[in-house]
Structure formats: structure tokens, C-alpha cells
Amino acid sequence: MKRRLNKKGKALVLSLSLVILISSIFIVKGLTKKEEDHILESTDTYDLKIDYPNIDNKKIMNKINEYIDYQKENFLNVVKDTKDLEQPKYDFNLSVTENNYNNVTYIYMLTFSYTGGAHYTRDDASIYYDNKSNEFIDITHFFKDEESFKKISSIVYYYVLDLKDKNFDELWVKQGTEATIDNYKHFKFTDEGLKILFPPYQVASWADGEISIVIPYEEINDLLKEEYRGTSKETEVINIVPETRDLSKFQNKKLIAFTFDDGPSESNTNYLLDNLDKYDAKVTFFVLGSRVENNKETIRRAYLEGNDIGSHTYNHRNLNLLSDSALMEELKKANDAIKDAIGKTPTLLRPPYGNLTDHGKELANMNIVLWNVDPLDWKYKDKNRVANEIIEHAHDGAIVLVHDIYKSSVEGALLAMEELQQQGYAFVTITEMAKLRGITLDTETSYFSMK
């Protein structure tokens, strides 16, 4: 015999159902966020920076950790006994990016290490994982047969030679594009086609930098296995009109510019954006070009909501240690990535570590923005300490440096805004502060503050 629920029973069931539904929504939503780890160390002799995603797949994660441990150990073994403090600080920068396309996970790991000499050393490593077969694969996995893979090398050869801004040695290119797995270690399939990256020295000199090409699907579909064929898409035309606000309300207020480096971060940057309206705040993001591709929607949102987007270079290398051509490549790649995301080339630049010579400024031809309030958030990772340091050193015209790759930094910045708002401060972008102060930004000046 079935029992009928009374009104209270029905209400209880309905409430429980809603709780379960809402909880499941938040759980699913939480799983879509990419979790990351970031390691920063700074001593008198070296700077070390490592960024990598936390991936549920243990087989992939083990390979990532092996690579990180190996590269870090090699670097520290070189620098631990250094006595030459007159030379520039040693520098280590390792980044790991993850892409997923058509049931394949692509992991690209890039290390720049400076331990003296003329330039950085570079190491590129890639991992490919078929999520259907649960196996590691290489580029031959995608082609119908060995002959198809051989044909791709001819197409790639001519694509490389067709790069008009390079003066290639044809034999060098021929050897670097032959149909061997070693020549095609760094690639990924995208909506546009097959993208292939050649590190320096593979098809051209160090001065020419890395060489990257994209071959559209219509040229290679006949060579690919059916499940990997695609249709080339036109590059998306971005026409984003950012939000603007009436700055007259800030005329008689004390101003602070909060700036966030090393992002964007899907989870932390969006958390920051979710809370800025509470304090009528806009901020400035100095983003890494290498992180933009996987976080386009986040950076577009930030720009659309009226925040400044500036460059922090592509790979966070010390610009003072680079040749002119390498410096220009760092800046151009970052600017291209940002423009691809928001439809506008940035005009603001924050050089990593604040390092840029007068000659570097001439080459960059961008507005250099530094800082004069630094809570060392990357070192202590304590939201209360971050907030207290910012509040203690706050002053009219200050430029605050924090990093939105850390949740504690974002939380600390928001706590500081809550207190400083009560003290009569307004939170503006670099561009807004310059307008309010009647300052015309120029490319020869490094801006630590705007009083």
C-alpha cells in the first residue's frame, strides 16, 4: 500500500531535491576549473619560476613531475656553488601547458635556464596521450600509414621555406623537416589545422628563434586517419568594446592601481573579477602570452569589463639577458597572443623582475609600468599578510604588485580594497590613473607610481 506525503513531507522532499541539484551543479562547475601549481624562489644568486597544471591522469602527471624534477635539479646543481656575484642573477623558468583536442591530451613543457654566457639555454619537451586507448602516442599515430607521414614532410618543408621574413638554408630546413619522430616532437591539432613548432637550431639559427607553422586540414586530410580529419576555420574576428566609466567621480579621491602579474588564471582571475564590483574597482593585468591561449575567455572577460590588459612578455624571461632579436620575439609573441584574444595590441609592458635597459625600452616601444608597493605575495602566500602589507604602504598614486595565479594573493588584495575603500581610496587602472593625473604616458619613462 502506497503512502501519500503530507504537505510537510512534500516540502521536505522538494528541499532535499533542490539541495542535491544545487550541490551537483557546483560540483560539476568546480571540476571544470583548471587547478594549477606555481613555484617561485628568489635568492641573491638566482630566480626560479615553475608553472604547471594538476592533471587527474597519474600517468601524465608522473611524466610532468619527472621532467620538472630533472630540469630543476640540473639547474640547482649548477648554481649552488657559484661565487661570482658580479654577474647577472641566474634564472630558471619552466612552464607546462595542457591542451585537449579530439580525445588527445597535449602537454608542452618549456624550460629557459640562464647560468651565464651569451644567452639562455632552452629545452622543449612534449607529451601526447590518447584518452581512448589510454596510451602515450607520437605524431605517426595520426596518419593513415608510413607513406602518409612521409608526404607530410614535403608539405612542411615548403611551408617553412615560404615564411617570407626568414632567410633559410634549404639543406638545414630539409634535414629538420624529414619524416622522423624526432623532427616532429612538438605539434598539436587545432580548429585551424596541424600546428608544428620547431625549436631554435632545428630548421634555423638561434637568432631566428622558434619556427611555427599551421597547415590547414584541406592540405592534409587525405593523409590523416578519418577520426582526426577536420575542416579549417577562419580566424575569429574579435570586436570587443570594453566597458568605460565616468572618471569624474574619482577627481578628489586618493588613487591606487592594483596590478596583477603572471596570469591569467581561470579560477583565480575569475574569482577576482567576480568581486571587483563590490569596491567599484578596475585593475590592470600584466599577462604572460604563454598563458593566454588556454585562458582566452578569462582575459576577454577582464578586458570587456573595463580592466587594462598589459604584457608581461611571453615566457617571463629576463629581458636584459636577451639579444635584440630574442627580446623582440618575446614581446611580439606576447602581443600577438593578447591581440588574438581581445582584438587589441597592448601598449603597457611590465618586464619580468622589472628589468629593462634604456636600449631595451627603445626596442620595446611600449609604456613601461613598474611598482612601488610589493607585499611579496608570491613568497608568503598569506592573504592577511598580503592585505596588511598593502594597507600599511598604501598612498595616493601607488602602484601595487600582486599575482593572480595565487588564490591567497587575490584574497589579500580584496581584503586590502575593503579597508582602503573606507579610507577614501579609489581603485583604478593604469590608463585611468594616467588620465586622472593628467599624465601622457611615454615610452622612455618607467612608471613606479603616479602622484
Image: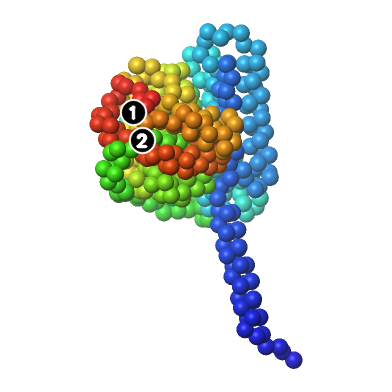
- As drawn, 270 above or below 6: above
- As drawn, 232 above or below 345: below
Q: Could you tell which of marks 2 and 1 lies nearer the N-terminus?
A: 2
Task: Give the residue pinned by disc 2.
Answer: 255
Which is more toward the observer, 290 or 265? 265
- As drawn, 260 above or below 225: above
Task: Name which quarter of the figure residue 436 lies in.
Answer: top left
Q: Residue at x 40, y 30 (%)?
A: 395
Q: Position of residue 81 (x, y in %)?
A: 65, 12
Judge left or right: residue 319 versus residue 383.
Answer: left
Which is more toward the observer, 329 or 399? 399
Q: Position of residue 106 (x, y in %)?
A: 55, 43
Q: Are marks 2 and 1 in contact (CB under 8 Å)?
A: yes
Task: Give the residue pinned by disc 1.
Answer: 450
Residue furthest out toward the front = 423
The residue tagged with tag 1: helix, strand or loop?
A: loop
